C-alpha cells in the first residue's frame, strides 16, 4: 500500500485531493412538498425494493445506515459536494487505472450517500459499456441495454429505476457493447449528458466509467463531465499505472483519489 501512496503523492504535486480509505475486501418525479426537494413521488420511473443481504454481500454498506463504516462514504460525499458546489459542477465520472479496483462499488455507495443529502437528487448511470456491473451490485433486473435507448427503441423513463431510496434514480445496463468508444465521444452522447443534468436544478449525475488504461472509453467520455474521481485498489495497480492515470487526468477537473480495499482498520467515531 505504501507504494500506492507514494505514487499518488508524487504525481499530484501539491494538488488538493479528496481521499478516503474505501471499503475492504430519474425519470419524471413530483415534489410533493412544494418547496426545495422534500419528498419525491416517482410517476413514470419503476420503483423496486432492494435486498439488504445481497447489498451487504456486494459491499454496498451505505444502504444500512447502522453500519459504522458507511461514515466513510458520508465524509467522501461531503468533500465532493463541497467542491462541486464551489464550482457549479453537476456531473462526476468515477474511473480507475485498471480493473478490479472496485470503482463500481464506490460509485454505488457514493450515489446512495449523496441521495440522502437532502439538497440534491442523484442519478447513477452505468456507462461502463464494456463491463456493466451497477445492476449486479444492486440486484436489479434490467430489461433493456443502454444501446436500446440510444437506438431509439425505448424511452429514457423506461430505463430508469428508483431503488426505493428517495431522490435516487439508476440508469442501469444489461449488455456489453463492443464499439462503445464511438458512442462515448459522439454528439449524441454530449446531448444526452446535457439533457439529464439540466432536467432538475439540484441534480448530481454520477457516471460509472471503465478503467482508464483498459480501454479508450473513459477518455472519450470525460470531456462531457465536470469532474472526475479516481479509484485506486490497494495492490491492484502498479506505481506506473497510477502515475499514467493521473497524467491522463491532469487536464481534467480532478477531484482526487479514493484508496479502496485498504488494509487500514476503520475505527469510526462513537
Image (spheres, grey):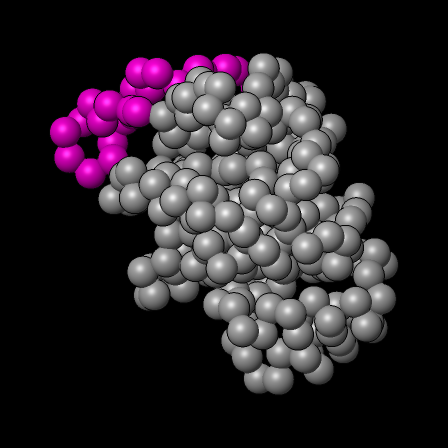
Q: Main secondary structure of the magenta part?
A: loop
Q: Say which quadrant the N terminus sits in.
A: bottom right
- x then y, percent, for residue 227: 48, 60
Magenta-highlighted residues = 28-50
| Residue 267 appears in the figure | no
- x then y, percent, for residue 13: 62, 84
Residue 44 placement: quadrant: top left
- x then y, percent, for residue 244: 73, 71
- Residue at left offset 81%, top offset 72%: 240
Residue 52: say if magenta: no
Residue 30 placement: quadrant: top left
Q: Is residue 134 left or right of residue 112?
A: right
Residue 35: say if magenta: yes
| Residue 9 appears in the figure | yes
Circle count: 0
- x then y, percent, for residue 113: 48, 41
- Residue at left offset 52%, top offset 15%: 49
Residue 39 placement: quadrant: top left
Q: Is residue 259 left or right of residue 109?
A: right
- Residue at left offset 45%, top offset 42%: 188
Q: Residue furthest left?
A: 34
The answer to whether 15 is drawn above or below residue 144 in the figure is below
As rendered, which of 141 and 64 lies closer to the eye? 141
As rendered, which of 141 and 60 lies closer to the eye? 141
Amino acid at each position: 500500500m505504501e507504494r500506492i501512496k507514494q505514487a499518488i503523492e508524487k504525481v499530484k504535486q501539491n494538488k488538493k485531493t479528496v481521499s478516503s480509505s474505501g471499503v475492504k475486501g430519474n425519470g419524471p418525479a413530483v415534489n410533493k412538498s412544494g418547496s426545495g426537494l422534500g419528498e419525491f413521488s416517482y410517476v413514470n420511473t419503476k420503483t423496486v425494493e432492494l435486498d439488504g443481504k445481497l447489498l451487504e454481500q456486494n459491499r454496498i454498506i451505505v444502504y444500512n445506515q447502522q453500519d459504522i463504516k458507511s461514515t466513510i462514504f458520508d465524509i467522501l460525499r461531503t468533500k465532493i459536494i463541497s467542491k462541486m458546489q464551489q464550482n457549479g459542477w453537476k456531473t462526476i465520472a468515477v474511473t480507475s487505472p485498471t480493473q478490479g479496483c472496485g470503482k463500481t462499488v464506490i460509485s454505488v455507495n457514493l450515489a446512495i450517500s449523496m441521495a440522502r443529502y437532502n439538497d440534491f437528487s442523484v442519478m447513477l448511470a452505468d456507462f461502463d459499456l464494456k463491463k456493466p456491473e451497477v445492476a449486479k451490485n444492486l440486484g436489479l433486473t434490467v430489461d433493456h441495454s443502454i444501446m436500446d435507448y440510444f437506438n431509439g427503441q425505448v424511452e429514457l423513463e423506461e430505463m430508469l429505476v428508483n431503488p426505493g431510496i428517495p431522490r435516487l434514480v439508476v440508469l442501469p445496463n444489461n449488455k456489453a457493447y463492443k464499439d462503445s468508444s464511438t458512442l462515448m465521444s459522439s454528439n449524441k452522447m454530449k446531448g444526452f449528458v446535457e439533457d439529464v443534468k439540466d432536467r432538475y436544478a439540484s441534480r448530481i449525475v454520477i457516471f460509472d466509467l471503465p478503467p482508464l488504461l483498459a480501454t479508450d472509453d473513459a477518455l472519450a467520455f470525460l470531456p462531457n463531465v465536470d469532474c472526475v474521481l479516481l479509484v485506486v485498489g490497494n495492490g491492484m495497480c502498479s506505481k506506473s499505472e497510477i502515475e499514467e492515470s493521473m497524467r491522463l487526468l491532469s487536464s481534467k477537473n480532478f477531484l482526487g483519489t479514493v484508496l479502496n480495499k485498504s488494509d487500514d482498520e476503520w475505527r469510526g467515531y462513537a
